[in-house]
Amino acid sequence: MRKLSRPFAQFFIGSAAIAGLVHSSLASADVTGYAVANIGYGYVDTEIDNEADVSYSAALGYQFHRQWYIEGGYISLIDADTDEQSISSKGPYVALLGRASSQKGELYYKLGIADIDIEHVSINSSVCVSDAICGYDDNIIAGLAGLGFDYYVGLQSMVRVEYTYFGGKDDFSAHIVNLGFRYNF
């Protein structure tokens, strides 16, 4: 398993410490956690190529205030494999979610960062210097912004519909549309 980049690890540990302090100060408040699993469609654009394919993610969230959540998880933006190329973009993320509740569910927005590992292998003589396999492997810290709605289907379960944009260095961008299931505990 590869190591997280130092800035991402510092941010993640700092966020966990802040969440722990907030939790201890709000012990009497109505605080909940949740788990969410998503599947969707992702379009990833790198400086070398772009591709669209199935996307999936899993995350844990924690409500530390009546309007605020912190969410951390792992996302596979794309994992496409064709006869000419293979492209994969995936990694951990952490985000802050603000919400507005209604009787039908919760509208939310999220802002955060992700540590995305991009691997691209191409078998194309016009791109490569020789007739060999050429590749690209990079690690990018990307910002993320999303908007979604969690629709109540039960006392502790919700269906999630979400759009998320990722952007980073070297013209990296990704657009993800997800459908997921959220379970509150």
Image (tube, rainbow, N blue to C red):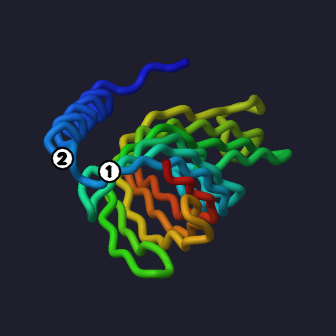
The kind of secondary structure element at disc 1 is loop
Residue 107 in the image: x percent, y percent? 41, 75
> Residue at image x 55%, y 51%?
36
Labels 2 & 1 near each other (Cβ < 8 A): yes
179 lies above or below 125: below
Q: Residue 145's image quarter?
A: bottom left
Q: Residue furthest right?
A: 83
Check disc 2 and report its element: helix, strand or loop. loop
Q: Is residue 37 left or right of residue 31?
A: right
Question: Residue extending furthest left?
Answer: 25
**What's the residue at 51%, 36% (across, down)?**
117
* Closer-to-camera residue (124/37): 37
| Residue position marked by numbered label 1 in the rendering | 31
Q: Is residue 182 above or below residue 14?
A: below
Q: Position of residue 29 (x, y in %)?
A: 23, 53
Figure quadrant of the N terminus: top right
Nearest the viewer among 29 and 76 is 29
The amino acid marked with disc number 2 is Leu
- Reading the image, the residue beneath label 2 is 26
Residue type beneath disc 1: Val
Mark 1: few/some/many CA within 10 Å (<14, 14-19, 20+): some
Q: Can you give x and y, in whole percent of width and height, for residue 13 in the image?
A: 27, 29
Image position of 83 (left or right of 126)? right
Q: CA distance from mark 2 to mark 1?
A: 8 Å
